[in-house]
Every structure is written in structure tokens, then in C-alpha cells.
Amino acid sequence: MYLVQLVYTSVSTSSMELGDIEKILKVARDTNKDNDITGMLCFNKEIFLQVLEGSRNAVNSLYQRIATDKRHDQLVILGYQELYRRDFQDWSMGFIPPSLISAEMNLKYSGDRHFNPYEMTGESALQFLKELKSRL
Ligand code: FAD
């Protein structure tokens, strides 16, 4: 089965505390492990940026489930590609805390000093996540 990678961004529908993110991560890590999905979730104030990788069927069906989750909306797929190997193979769902996202990082990958993946290309968003992963 093909390996694919999907990067999307979204906006939370209500204010989220760390505990709310931890609930999402707990379910994500358990479920993703069972489905051989790996990836990374980034959240800052109200915006999510997530990368999912795994078999095409597994990633497509997870994305469809995530897209109906009422905890966020305005989902935009920034990138979708076939892979020859995973970029996040050690993470059933890694988490990038807001403290790692600096104005310098935002300016490196977008024209905006604030975290705004809607202003990033798919490649910029992916490289942004990979650089943050390397700092975890
Ligand atoms: P159920 O648990 O039956 O939930 C159905 C709906 O109820 C959800 O869609 C949601 O709208 C709501 N809901 C569920 N739990 C809560 C809660 N604690 N508080 C408020 N509303 C709730 N799941 C994964 O498996 N892997 C991931 O990588 C992943 N990433 C996510 C990233 C984001 C940004 C968000 C918001 C959710 C993510 N989820 C992920 C969760 C996913 O959307 C589903 O809730 C989860 O997979 C369970 O699916 P289910 O069909 O059993 O839903």
C-alpha cells in the first residue's frame, strides 16, 4: 500500500486549554498506533497545523474523521503527496507546544511574524514542522 503524507491547517471553534489538547493527543496516539499512522500536531492559540502519514487508505479515512470534528473548522489541505519514507516515523502523534513557535520561525517559513499556516505553502508548512520536530 502506498505511503502518503497530508498536511492541513484548521481553526479551533472554542478556546482550548492544554488539557483539551491532551485529550485529542491521547485518542490520536492510541488510534494512530493501531493504524500505523505517524505525524505531528502543532497548536498555537487557535490554529492547528497537523501532518499525517501512513497508508493512503488509513490517512484518507482519518482525515475524513478529523474533518467532521466540531472542535475545529476552516480546514484547508496545504499538501498531499506520496512518500518513499516517513518523515515522522517515531511519532504516533508528536506535539509541538506554542513555546517552540517563535516570530523568527514564522518569518522563516511565511511572510507573517505570527503563526499563520494559511499563509504558508504546503512545502513551507512541512519544513516548518520538520524543523520544530528536530528541536523536540
Ligand atoms: P468520537 O470520539 O465518537 O467523537 C465524535 C465527535 O465528538 C468528534 O468528532 C468531536 O466533534 C466530538 N468529541 C469527541 N471527543 C470530544 C471531547 N473530548 N471534547 C469535545 N468534543 C469531543 N484522532 C485520531 O485518531 N488521530 C489523530 O491524529 C487526530 N488528530 C486530531 C487533530 C485535531 C486538531 C482534532 C480536533 C482532532 C483530532 N483527532 C484525531 C480526533 C478525531 O477527530 C476523532 O475525535 C477521534 O479520532 C475519535 O473518532 P470517533 O469517530 O471515535 O469520534
Image: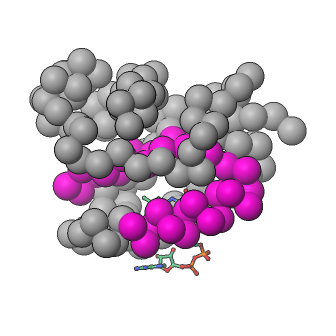
Query: Is the image coloured rainbow, by chain, by secondary structure, or in one colour?
Result: one colour
Please name the residue shown 17% across and 33% down the image: 102
Q: Position of residue 135 (x, y in %)?
A: 35, 30
Please name the residue shown 34% across and 72% down the image: 20
76 vs 103, left or right, is right
Q: Position of residue 83 (x, y in %)?
A: 70, 26
Q: Which residues are magenta?
A: 22-51
Give the residue furthest to the right: 1
81 vs 136, left or right, is right
Q: Nearer the viewer, residue 58 or 91?
A: 91
Total numbered labels placed on residues in the image: 0
Q: Quadrant of residue 104?
A: top left
Q: Quadrant of residue 3?
A: top right
Q: Nearer the viewer, residue 72 or 93?
A: 93
Q: Quadrant of the C terminus?
A: top left
Give the residue furthest to the top: 108
Q: Position of residue 131 (x, y in %)?
A: 38, 25
Question: Can residue 80 be seen in this snapshot?
Answer: no
Question: Can residue 120 be seen in this snapshot?
Answer: yes
Q: Quadrant of the N terminus?
A: top right
Q: Position of residue 109 (x, y in %)?
A: 29, 21
117 vs 61, left or right, is left
Residue 29 falls inside the magenta stretch = yes
Please name the residue shown 31% across and 37% down the image: 117
Residue 2 falls inside the magenta stretch = no
